[in-house]
Amino acid sequence: MTPPTVAEKRRNAPHTSMFLRMLMRAAVLRRGRAVSALLAMIIAAAVTTTMLNLYVDVQAKLRKEFRNYGANVVVVGKDGASLPVDALGKVRSVIGPRDLVVPFAYIVARSNDGRSVVVAGTNFDEVRKLDSWWSVTAWPQRADDALIGVRAANVVGDTTKPFDLSFHDRKLTITPAGTVRTGADEDSRIYLPLATFEQWTNVAPSTLEIAVSGSPEEVSAVATRLANALPEAEVKPVRQVMEGEARVLGKTKSTLLYAAVLIILTAGLCVLSTLTGWVFDRRRDFAIMKALGASERLINGFFAAEAAALGAVGALLGFVIGIGAAAWIGRVNFNAPVVPRFSVLPFILAGSIAVALLSAVLPISLLRRVQPAMILRGE
């Protein structure tokens, strides 16, 4: 069998360049409709890109925000007893390196006039990280400095001067460094550095407040491991924080998903309307193509290629816009940029082309009804 000649190859090869020129000319001649369809695809791709980037990052960022509102696991001594000396070390061996654990010790002391007040010892450096939502005028810096709750200030009187507290006949002179307001029990307490507190009272911490990173399921798993490591203590997940976190995360993810679906459907309807208008505007062109011998397959392929080109260009432009929008939302809402995820580009590209092709199904069915003789006679 003789190989085909160059002339035969050219004759049998698809006229790709002509096909592309026809696509470009069709878009230029009807640029009004093309621009409206392209804008719809760009918006859909941009919103979807933004949502997918946020969908991945928002979970971690929201959990980080939740950690600013305190502990989600609390370890306490049974029956109010102090925790074992090695409890803090055991907890740190169970939790992750980025998780926080803060010890608290409590007593009831008396002021000079015999009034009772709760005094707590803790690590202020860790408290500032764990409970950054506290409203504090000034944090203690020295060993004898104290943080005074706004209601506890009524017990000690003038918070600008040192005052004495007694516990089991042992007195301690305290210098107020600032006040704390939370709207909760902290307002009724006086906080001291843990080392000063233990030296004064000989009372060890009875509570460990822990901020565990991760989903509610992961937090529950950590709580179970802590309970196994500390059988002499009670481990209590803070259900209010965990359930609130799960509820907010669930609603946020659902909102992102529903918004993306709604935008995609709207874009699909816009493209469908545009392509249907194209069919009516160009029915004479298609009639001429059929009269010259073009097959329905070729005409349908040409029309589908126009739709796919709209989807592809819209996807690429929308992806760039969506990456920028996601980064802006991350800075505004979380004070941290959202990492661009280029791995979503294939999904955006494939999805946009699929939406455009699905929107072309009805217009393509209308193409099949074009009768060249009737159209060319003006009927």
Image: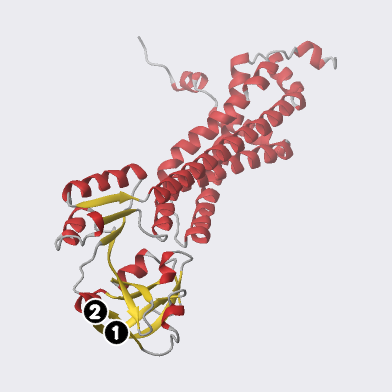
- Mark 1 highlights which residue? 144
Looking at this view, name the residue that lies furthest to the left. Answer: 86
Which image quarter holds the C terminus?
top right
Residue 112 falls left or right of residue 35 = left
Q: Report the residue at 14% width, 63% height from top.
A: 85
Q: Report the residue at 52% width, 58% height from top.
A: 328
Residue 104, how many percent across, how many down?
28, 66
Asked whether residue 295 is in view, the answer is: no
Circle 2 SS class: helix
> Do callouts 1 and 2 mark residues in contact (Cβ within 8 Å)?
yes
Numbered circles on residues, count: 2
Residue 75 falls left or right of residue 156 = left
Q: In the depicted view, which residue is nearer to us: 80 or 12? A: 80
> Which quarter of the picture shows residue 126?
bottom left
Looking at this view, name the residue that lies furthest to the bottom. Answer: 161
Which mark identifies residue 196?
2
